[in-house]
Image (tube, rainbow, N blue to C red):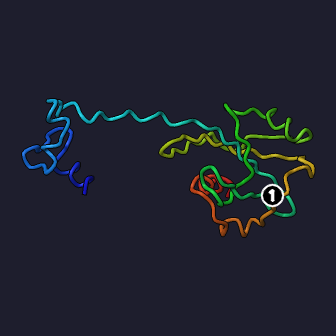
Amino acid sequence: AVMELGATVCTPRDPACGHCPLAARCIARKQDLIGLLPVKAKKAAPRLRHFNYLVIEEKGGLLFTQRGSGDIWQGLNELPLMETRSAARPSAFKKKFPSATATRIAGPMDHVLSHQRIRAVLWKVTDIGHRFPSTWKPVKRSAIRRLPTHRLMEKLLDLLD
């Protein structure tokens, strides 16, 4: 009801104070601040995140993992992810996988959410060895599209086809 009141009676540009059931208790009206209240807060700029998705072939498929809780897209599947503070270079992968070779195959691709902007890059990673996390599981290419994934992952997978 309060939202309906704000949308139809107490509008920012042309409030209909004479029709308002709360006019007698209205602070803006009492203090002659009708055109100034409420103050609309400015939206915070969306946070920029750099997502580096790893395309790693293993046992006849690609490695996938499931997103954990506490962040966006909880429980959905995606290629292994390395998030960095800025755009990554191939050498960034050497810290985690010393023997690996990384080659950019697509991106950057921007994906905008309400509170953050994601810049995604696909990297082909080879010679990784077997030192990857146990949560990374091989998925046959024929089964990938049946996995529950987020929209950004669908777009990136389209680039691999």
Percent of width and height locating residue 71: 62, 49
Q: Nearer the viewer, residue 136 or 59?
A: 136
Q: Is 82 positioned to the left or the right of 37 in the image?
A: right
Percent of width and height locating residue 52: 70, 42
Secondary element type, mark 1: loop
Percent of width and height locating residue 40: 32, 35
* Residue found farthest to the left: 18
Looking at the rendered structure, the kind of residue marked 1 is Thr
Residue 83 occupies quadrant: top right
Q: Nearer the viewer, residue 106 or 28?
A: 28
Q: Name the residue tied to disc 1.
A: 135
In the rendered image, the vertical position of residue 99 relative to residue 147, given as above or below:
above
**Image quarter hosting the N terminus:** bottom left
Q: Is 18 positioned to the left or the right of 104 in the image?
A: left
Q: Nearer the viewer, residue 130 or 69?
A: 69
In the rendered image, the vertical position of residue 83 relative to residue 91, given as above or below:
below
Q: Residue at x 20, y 52 (%)?
A: 5
How many numbered discs?
1
Q: Residue at x 7, y 45 (%)?
A: 18
For mark 1, does the 10 Å Cα neighbourhood hold few (<14), some (14 to 19), or many (20 or more) residues? few
